[in-house]
Amino acid sequence: MSVPAYARLEPSIRISPAPPSIIYVERPRSRLPLIIMIIIIVIIIIVILVMIGMLTIKRTPAGICSSNLDCPDNLLCDKASGKCHQCLDNKQCGNQQSYCDPSDHVCKDCRNNLDCPVGAPYCVSGNCLTCRNDLDCDQTSLYPRCNQSTGKCVI
């Protein structure tokens, strides 16, 4: 058996296949997805800590306001007293409740009977009512009695 000529080469020289003709160049990876993921995780941790009460967002001390932003539920800040109220003047009261009671800063229907419409002519505690007692209801109608908790004439 004869050894082919190419096999008689020096042992340190080896024949290897040709390199591939397609060269892949790896692009540098963007760190943006990693940064976004870290931001999302931090936000989730902050929300959880706020929900369980371990982290509080700095606000004005409870019961004291310096602007409307310190008041919850669309209440308004009375800067003079530092308290949050439903209204400070009549402009904040709309529709049926058109008067801001200066004693408690709550919108009310009326200040007196003259503010009430014909169908509910009695002003009781800031509300226009149909009746205050049975005498205010038409005794000959289907509704001769006054329900004093609702201020309406009933059967």
Image: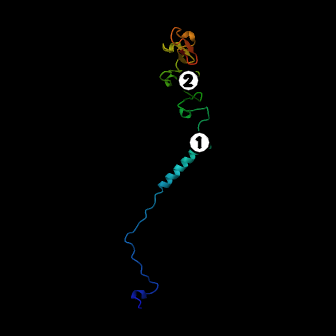
**Label 2, on which residue?**
106
Element carrying mark 1: helix
Most foreground residue, 118 or 35:
118
Distance, label 1 to label 2, CA atoms, is 31 Å
Rendered residue at 62%/34% (across/down): 62
Residue 136 at x, y percent in the picture: 54, 10
- Residue type of the residue flagged with mark 1: Met
Measured as percent of width and height from the top left, residue 37 is found at 51, 52
Q: Given contact means CB atoms under 8 Å apart, are the residues at marks 1 and 2 in contact?
A: no
Q: Quadrant of the N terminus?
A: bottom left
**Residue 28 relative to residue 150: left or right:** left
Is 4 displayed left or right of 119 in the figure? left
Q: Residue at x 55, y 23 (%)?
A: 106
The amino acid type, in three-letter code, at marker 2 is: Val
Q: Is residue 87 above or below residue 136?
A: below
Residue labelled with disc 1 = 51
Q: Residue furthest top?
A: 140
Q: Secondary structure at mark 2?
A: strand
| Residue 153 percent across, percent down from the top left | 53, 14
Q: Earlier in the sequence, mark 1 or mark 2?
A: 1
Question: Which quadrant: the C terminus?
Answer: top right
Q: Residue at x 57, y 11 (%)?
A: 134
Q: Position of residue 21 (x, y in %)?
A: 37, 71
The numbered mark at residue 18 is none
